[in-house]
Amino acid sequence: MIKFFLMHKDDVCGTLILDETTGRLLQYHDNGELLSPYLGTADTQKMKKWWEMRAVPASRTMIQKAIRESGCLNAETYLAKNLALSMTDSYWICPENIDLKYKDIKFSNLALYNEGKIPYHNATSYDPNASLGGQMEKYWNLQGSSPLLIKESYKYYGQQSINEVFASMIHKLQDTDVPYVQYSAAITEDHGILSRCNAFTSEEIELISAYEIIQSSKINNESSLYDGYIQICIQNGIDQEVIQNFMDYQTLTDFVISNTDEHLQNFGVLRDTSTMKLIGPAPIFDSGNSMFFSETRTQPYTRAQILERKITGFYEYEDKMLRKVQNRKIVKLDLLPSKQDVKERYVQSGIPE
C-alpha cells in the first residue's frame, strides 16, 4: 500500500491509500476543508468511484500501448504514475515524503519539454492523456497557445467526428446564449476523420461533472435526479433561470441530433479554482454518439420508436427526458439547419459528402 495526499493545486484535500500492485484506491480520509471532490463531501466509497472514472478506459488502443510501454499493470496504476493529473481540473496526488508543488507538475509547463512530456525523478513522464475519458481515441495537443483536444474516428466512416461538427453548426445557427464547444474536423492521412476543439478549462476554471454534483448531496425521495441536479446547482450559486435554460436547451438539441450518450460525465458545471465557487453550466460538448452513427437498420424509425429509443442519462428513454423540458421554444425550429446548410458546411470543412 502507498500513501498519497490528494491535492487541489497546493491545498491538501485529504489522504488516500492505493494498492501498489493494482493501483486501486483502498481508503480515503477527508481533512474537512471542503476541498475534496463531490463539492467537498468525498468519502472512501465516493473516491473509489472517482478514481475508477478518472482512469482512462483500457479498451482504447492508444492507452493500451501507453500502459505497456510505461510498465504499468493497468489504467489505474498508469493514472497513479501520472499523479492523477487532469486537463479538466486542478486535482492531483502527491506521494508522501516528496516535496512537490503544483507549479512543478501542472500541464501548462509541458509544452516546454520534448513531445509534451516532463520527466519526474527519472522514473516516469506526465501524460495529459492518462485521465482522458471516453471510448474514442483522443489526446491533448499542448503545443499551441491553447490546449487542443483531438479525437480520432475510424469506425462508422468517421461519423462520430462529423457529428461533433454538425452539433456545433446547430448551436451556431440557433444564436443561443447557452455555452457550447465549437468543433472542427479534418481527414487524416490514413483516411480517418478527426475532430478538434479548444479546451474550455484552465488553471483558473475547472469542470465538475453532473455525476459529482448529484452525488454531493442527498436528493429528496420525492424529486427526480434531473430536478435534484438543478436544485443542487441553484443551492451552490448558479442562477435558477440559467441552469434551467441550459438543461432545456441541451435536452432538446440532444433529441434533435438523437444523441444517446447523455451520461452524467458528459456535462456538468464550471468552478473557479481559487474561490471554489460554481460559475455556471459547462459548455455543451461530446455529441459524437448521435445521428444513428452505429445503426445498421434499413427502415427509418417511427415517431413512437424514436421516443422509445434507449439513452444513457437521467432517464432510460427519450420521452421521459423530454417531459422535463419547461421551455420548448428555447430551440427555434426555423433556425435548425437545412440540407443546404449541411452541404455547405461539409464543403467548407473539406470533408467529402
Image (cartoon, helix red, strand yellow):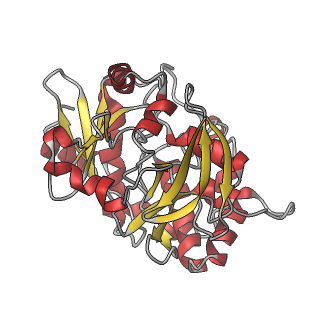
The residue lying at 63 percent from left, 63 percent from top is 325
Residue in front for this viewpoint, 34 or 96: 96
Tell me, yes or no, if residue 290 can be seen here.
Answer: no
The residue lying at 36 percent from left, 65 percent from top is 174
The relative height of residue 81 versus residue 34 in the rendered view (above or below) is above
The residue lying at 18 percent from left, 47 percent from top is 344
Question: Where in the figure is residue 253, as x and y percent of width and height?
Answer: 48, 54
Query: Where on the picture, by quarter, is residue 248?
Result: bottom right
The residue lying at 61 percent from left, 56 percent from top is 212
Residue in front for this viewpoint, 76 or 182: 76
Along the horizontal axis of the image, is 30 left or right of 344? right
Question: Where in the figure is residue 349, as x and y percent of width and height?
Answer: 16, 43
Question: Where in the figure is residue 353, as x and y percent of width and height?
Answer: 21, 32
The relative height of residue 136 versus residue 336 in the rendered view (above or below) is above
Tell me, yes or no, if residue 15 can be seen here.
Answer: yes
Please state, as top left, top right, bottom left or bottom right, where the N terminus lies in the image.
top right
Along the horizontal axis of the image, is 83 left or right of 240? left
Q: Farthest residue toward the front?
A: 97
Residue in front for this viewpoint, 46 or 219: 46
Q: How many marks?
A: 0
Residue in front for this viewpoint, 199 or 172: 199
Question: Where in the figure is residue 114, as x and y percent of width and height?
Answer: 14, 40
Along the horizontal axis of the image, is 275 left or right of 43? left
Along the horizontal axis of the image, is 299 left or right of 293? right
